[in-house]
Image: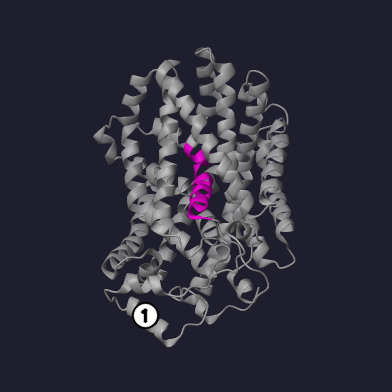
Amino acid sequence: MPPADPRDAQPDNEDTAPQDATERGRSSASENGSSDGPRAAQREPTARPREESSQAAAGLSDVSREAAHRREEPYATWSSERAFVLSTAAAGVGLGNLWRFPTLVGENGGGAFLVAYAIAVVAFAIPFAALEVAAGRNSHGSVIASFRRLGRAFVAFGVAVVLLTLMINSYYFVVTGWTFGYAVESTLGAPPAFGEFSSGFASVWWLGGTGAVVAAILAFGLSGIERAAQFLMPVLLLALGGIAIYGLQNGAAGEAMDFLFSTDATRFADPGLWRAAFGQAFFSMTIGQGYLITYGSYLPRRVHVPRAVASIAAMNSGVAILAGIAIFPLVFAAGLSPDAGSELAFETLPKAFENMGAGGILAPVFFWLLFLAALSSCLGGAKVVTAALREQWRPFGQVSAVIAGILAIVALAVPSALSYSAAEWRIAGEPVLDAVDRTIGSNGVILAAIGSSLILGWRFSPGHLCRQFGLRHGAARTLAWIVRLGPLGLGVLFGVTTVT
């Protein structure tokens, strides 16, 4: 790794290109709260990548800003704001919104959870997500490089985030393999019971298939992710919309809508409800997992970050609510419980499809939908790992970094896959996958999100927020205190609910 520029510790130095005296004066005016701050921010010079075309730039290798300025290689950028929004939304949608969100709605009282989730997204998730995107764009590097730019003391946190994402991917690839297997099985015939599916070594084989698909897409660089998102998101929305229409016409629509949108105000006094809502908001927006920093590192300067992040949040939340509208009419029509937990996707819904006599059509559509959504999240998580490898270890080229990263993920995933196989690997009597999910996937994600928000909130000055988000100084100062104090409150909530 090259020696750190002394300016790396100053996030307010938005560009590494030299500035003349006039430009420095404009930057200083923004920092000192001049009313001309946002206009000065728009006039600031930016270090633009050497692009032949937007799509060509998207296909370039993953390199850091420092490497680009040394003229080793030009660095990649998204071809458009739309490509960034679609790709980032696809990375967040995944199983978190199609599988985890309906499960949490069912377990936390329906409408009350939706209200708490909406508050969490608007008041906290969007500002923190915008900070992570801005941090990535500011450094134009991996998660490690982005935190190093904030100060050498934060390098260890950047490494920890990459390792956390690596561990989460290790079991997420296994679950994605399940959806892959169920999609194929339901297309060829009736989907098997989960106990039957996991009685052999199918989890291991489908894990390998998932890794191969992810590696093939990432080998094409940023353009591979763009093209995948441009295909996955429309197909996902069409399939989910089709299931929702079928469910509303043929399922228990009234009962489902009442469950989803009627609110029991007494539930708001439950700290567990707020923990679940904030956890899901951070999980679905991928805060603290490196996705936003990594994807933001390819973001052109011309893109308006708050608008892009708001679009991502709206798309994520819309898919989550649409998933509830699609799933719960079928569940209630079949007389099944909406709080079936993680069994909802693999056990409860296939029974609902079968009871309605539409299993031959709905089951394949639903499981291909689940697989495509999960695959989009796998792409984002693997990109965090492979981008860090590409940047931190020079011998890696683009393809070799992808191969090394996917092999690392799959190797770590094997114990989780074997825990749901004939081998039945356990940790203290608990399947390895469940143990990793409980310790790393749930608690680890929340802690990483709080830690990332704290670091970025306190290292980004109001002047820097003016430049990044086009805000006037008063609004930027208010936002600065929100993002500084918000994580402290979330830390208290997390601590209290953990103890109780």
Which of the two residues, 51 or 186, is positioned nearer the viewer here?
A: 51
Q: Is residue 205 above or below residue 61?
A: above
The amino acid type found where label 1 is placed reads: Arg
Q: Is residue 145 visible?
A: yes
Which of the two residues, 488 or 387, is positioned nearer the viewer here?
A: 387
Q: Position of residue 399 (x, y in %)?
A: 73, 56
Q: Position of residue 352 (x, y in %)?
A: 50, 18
Q: Position of residue 367 (x, y in %)?
A: 58, 29
Query: Which part of the image, by quadrant, shows the C terminus?
Result: top left
Which of the two residues, 128 or 476, is positioned nearer the viewer here?
A: 476
Q: Quadrant of residue 186?
A: top right
Residue positioned most to the left = 265
Q: Quadrant of residue 176?
A: top right
What colour scheme was applied to this rendering of the protein? Answer: one colour
Q: Which residues lie in the magenta part? A: 80-97
Which of the two residues, 413 or 476, is positioned nearer the viewer here?
A: 476
Disc 1 is placed on an element classified as helix
Please report the residue visible at 56 percent of the width from the left and 79 percent of the height from the top.
Answer: 5
Q: Is residue 384 left or right of residue 340?
A: right
Please report the residue visible at 44 percent of the width from the left and 21 percent of the height from the top.
Answer: 247
Q: Position of residue 22 (x, y in %)?
A: 40, 85
Please report the residue visible at 42 percent of the width from the left and 25 percent of the height from the top.
Answer: 328
Question: Main SS type for the magenta part?
Answer: helix
Q: Is residue 234 left or right of residue 277?
A: right
Residue positioned most to the bottom = 21
Query: Which part of the image, by quadrant, shows the N terminus?
Result: bottom right
Residue 415 covered by magenta stretch: no
Q: Give the class, few, some or many, for how many residues have Cα within 10 Å of label 1's Cα (few <14, many ≥20).
A: some
Residue 81 covered by magenta stretch: yes
Q: Quadrant of residue 73?
A: bottom right
- Residue marked by disc 1: 26
